[in-house]
Image (cartoon, helix red, strand yellow):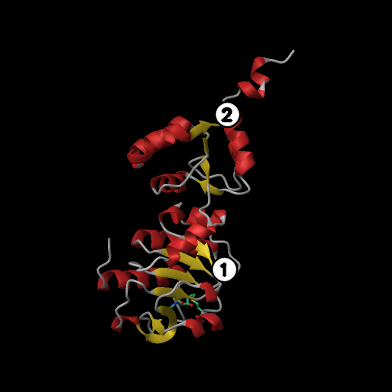
């Protein structure tokens, strides 16, 4: 005879887990409280969310994000620690994870092409480091940039990028494009050999491009650039970190224009 508690249909967590397994291949993994918080705040479609200690996550929301507490309460299913560990590649200290629907490429292209554009698009030309890409998406979200476009092979929606971006992909537009598909607008490419950025006012519809961590700007991107700009840097220092360069450039834009922030 089957014991009642071994019947999967009697387990309240089984339906969410079925949903998780069905969607894990196509959805975006939100790993940890901050990623889930931002995704909820910025309107992500979240079909399933799990936590090892649901009450602890809701207490965290009471403390850090009361605005999304009720939404989280409706989303979260409690699962055993072993079940949670099997669902995520790198368990997060907050032991909460969710799946979100990745916005379609069509929707992203439409947002990137929309004119007039009131805030810049950031282009990362063949970035190699997932953490850098996430940090840049977080910056773009913070500055209200229109979006972040990557060229090359890195998937800007890779779980490690989403984790490094604290789930802020949903607060901007993130897509991978070829150099010849970049949005319209004056293209300012950042390079230590360019003209000093301090003498330039960056327009709101600027496309701001940054080179790869090792090789810098690709020949294709250089050929498309309208202006090459440098960030102030003392002689004998070769370059800044990619995400740091994006931070300085967005800050420069925000101080010189009527930034909407
Ligand atoms: C780590 S750097 C790349 C270094 C690479 N070895 C090179 O030759 O450019 C990554 C990107 O950050 C930006 N960057 C770094 N330092 C910069 C500076 N002083 N001025 C302008 N852009 C800079 C550029 O877009 C650069 O391609």
* Mark 1, secondary structure of its residue: loop
The quadrant holding residue 157 is bottom right
- In the image, residue 160 sits, relative to residue 4, either above or below, namely below
x and y percent of residue 177 in the render?
54, 68
In the rendered image, is residue 208 in sight? yes
100 on left or right of 143: right
The residue tagged 1 is 128
Camera-side residue of 88 and 22: 22
Instruction: Assign the C terminus to one quadrant of the image.
Output: bottom left
The residue tagged 2 is 13
166 on left or right of 127: left
- In the image, residue 153 sits, relative to residue 237, either above or below, namely above
- In the image, residue 108 sits, relative to residue 246, either above or below, namely above
* Mark 2, secondary structure of its residue: loop
- Name the mark nearer the viewer: 2 or 1: 2
Q: Residue at x 52, y 79 (%)?
A: 216
x and y percent of residue 122 in the render?
43, 69
Camera-side residue of 153 and 245: 153
The quadrant holding residue 7 is top right
Is ligand 1 closer than 8 angstroms to the Cβ of mark 2? no
x and y percent of residue 32 in the render?
49, 45
Instruction: Assign the N terminus to one quadrant of the image.
Output: top right
- In the image, residue 174 sits, relative to residue 15, either above or below, namely below
Distance from disc 2 to disc 1, alpha carbons, whole Å, reads: 38 Å
The first of marks 2 and 1 along the sequence is 2
Is ligand 1 closer than 8 angstroms to the Cβ of mark 1? no
Camera-side residue of 213 and 217: 217
């Amino acid at each position: 005879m089957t014991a009642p508690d071994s019947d999967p249909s009697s387990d309240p967590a089984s339906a969410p887990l079925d949903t998780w397994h069905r969607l894990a291949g196509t959805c975006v993994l939100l790993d940890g409280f901050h990623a889930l918080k931002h995704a909820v705040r910025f309107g992500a479609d979240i079909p399933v969310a799990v936590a090892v200690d649901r009450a602890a996550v809701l207490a965290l929301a009471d403390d850090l994000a009361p605005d999304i507490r009720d939404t989280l309460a409706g989303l979260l299913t409690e699962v055993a620690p072993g079940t949670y560990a099997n669902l995520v590649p790198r368990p997060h200290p907050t032991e909460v994870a969710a799946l979100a629907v990745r916005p379609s490429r069509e929707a992203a292209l439409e947002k990137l092409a929309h004119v007039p554009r009131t805030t810049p698009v950031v282009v990362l030309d063949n970035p190699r480091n997932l953490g850098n890409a996430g940090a840049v998406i977080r910056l773009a979200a913070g500055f209200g940039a229109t979006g972040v476009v990557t060229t090359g092979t890195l998937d800007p929606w890779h779980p490690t990028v989403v984790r490094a971006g604290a789930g802020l992909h949903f607060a901007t537009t993130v897509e991978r494009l070829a150099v010849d598909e970049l949005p319209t607008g004056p293209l300012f490419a950042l390079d230590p050999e360019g003209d000093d950025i301090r003498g330039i006012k960056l327009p709101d519809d600027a496309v701001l491009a940054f080179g790869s961590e090792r090789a810098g700007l690709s020949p294709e991107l250089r050929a498309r650039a309208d202006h090459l700009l440098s960030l102030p840097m003392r002689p004998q220092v070769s370059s800044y970190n990619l995400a740091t360069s994006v931070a300085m450039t967005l800050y420069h834009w925000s101080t010189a224009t009527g930034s909407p922030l």
